[in-house]
Amino acid sequence: MNTDPNTVPDPRMVRQAITWMLRMGNAGPDGRVQRQCADWRAADQRHELAWQRIQAMNQEIASSYRAVPGAGLALESGAQRLGRRQALKLLGVVTAMGSAAWLGRNLDQWQQWSSDYATGVGERRSYTLPDGSRMQLNTHSAADITFTGQQRLVSLKHGEIMLTCQPDPRPFRVSNRDALFEAAEGRFMVRQQDDCTRLTVATGKVAMYPAQGSTPVWAHAGQSWQIDPTGPRLLATADMDMGAWAEGLIVTRDMRLQAFLEEVGRYRHGYLGCATEIADLRLSGVFRLDDTDKLLALLPQTLPVKLRTRTRYWVRLENA
């Protein structure tokens, strides 16, 4: 059969595959349901394609946790991982969209729909967790929570979160692609970037367990750390307030213009960039995130730059 990952499964077959996943999850060790599902898969190549694509997505999601020390506390088997809730969400999304094209390669899109908590581009939200702790999600972020009698776990899929942890006998953990973070109480932020994760501790202290090792590294209040495949690294003084986004602000301190635009670009759709000759200009100040068009319009008032705008979704800064 055709197993090309770019092949789009038939939407009807995807719905059927999810239904079979639901049935198998509810039936447990019932061999009769297992055989019926096997017969359905064998009856048509399109059935098998839909089934394999759903399974591959499930494995891809689960694999993001396997590399993290301690993640086994939250990781369940394939059928359990999607479970009834995730499978029903998945079924609802496919039905609503009328297409299974999103099952191709865009894991972020799946995570946005299937996560317990998620925000879109430019959106920020705050939640009170079951233990009274507060979780704030920054732009384009997604996370799941698993609270048990032994632990409080937040699984960060992508984006950035700020956590204000309430005292509790259970440890408070955050897992993501690069590490497992553990705290008893306090406030800290975890930001997952393309090539690394950044941890900033506002109050309290956080133990980091990098994916490549099992020995904890402690981060203390006022510190920012970067975690990548080479391990954790303490960062020098930041060029912006890493927690200001929770108040709807970007607060910069002698920040490069290009880095500033990259940060603002996280809160809007489309292209935002600048000419090479002005990339190293520096700016300091407090900028509101609620209207990034107004924010950008302020820059020519403080820097020798001009805005070149083709559409609202294509903005470039050039030398004035």
Image (cartoon, rainbow, N blue to C red):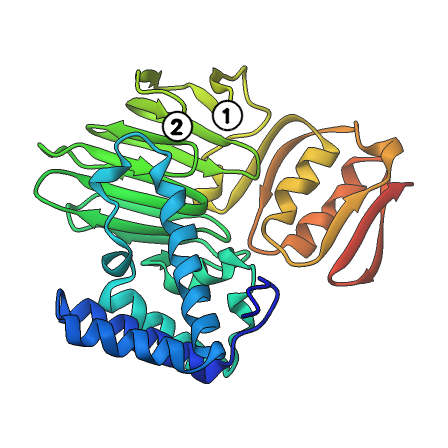
Numbered circle sitting on residue 211: 2
Q: Which amino acid type is shown beneath numbered disc 1?
A: Pro
Residue drawn at 30 percent across, 16 percent down = 215
Which image quadrant for residue 285?
top right
Mark 2 vs mark 1, CA separation in Å? 8 Å
Residue 54 % position (x, y): 41, 65
Q: Which residue is mark 1?
A: 229
- 269 over 45 or under it: above or below: above
Please name the residue shown 24% across and 28% down the image.
183
Dot 2: element: loop
Instruction: Tally the numbered discs.
Output: 2
The residue closer to the viewer here, 40 or 268, is: 40
* Labelled pair 2, 1 in contact (Cβ < 8 Å): yes
The mark nearer the N terminus, 2 or 1, is: 2
Query: Which of 167 and 148 lies nearest the eye of the viewer?
Result: 148
Question: In this rendering, does residue 76 appear at all?
Answer: yes
Task: Please give left or right for residue 301 compared with residue 212 in the image.
Answer: right
Residue 147 in the image: above or below residue 191: below
Q: Is residue 142 visible?
A: no
**At label 2, which amino acid type do we have?**
Ala
| On screen, residue 87 above or below 165 | below
**Left or right side of 78 for 159:** right
Residue 276 location in percent, x, y? 86, 34
Please give left or right for residue 100 compared with residue 171 in the image.
right
Quarter of the image where the N terminus is located:
bottom right
Q: Position of residue 26 (x, y in %)?
A: 16, 71
If the image is split into quadrants, where does the C terminus sit? Answer: top right
Task: Give the class, few, some or many, for how many residues have Cα within 10 Å of label 2's Cα (few <14, many ≥20).
Answer: many
* Circle 1 Cα neighbour tier, 10 Å, few/some/many (<14 / 14–19 / ≥20): few
Q: Is residue 37 left or right of residue 255?
A: left
User: Quick one: SS at disc 1?
Assistant: loop
What residue do we see at 31% from left, 37% from top?
174
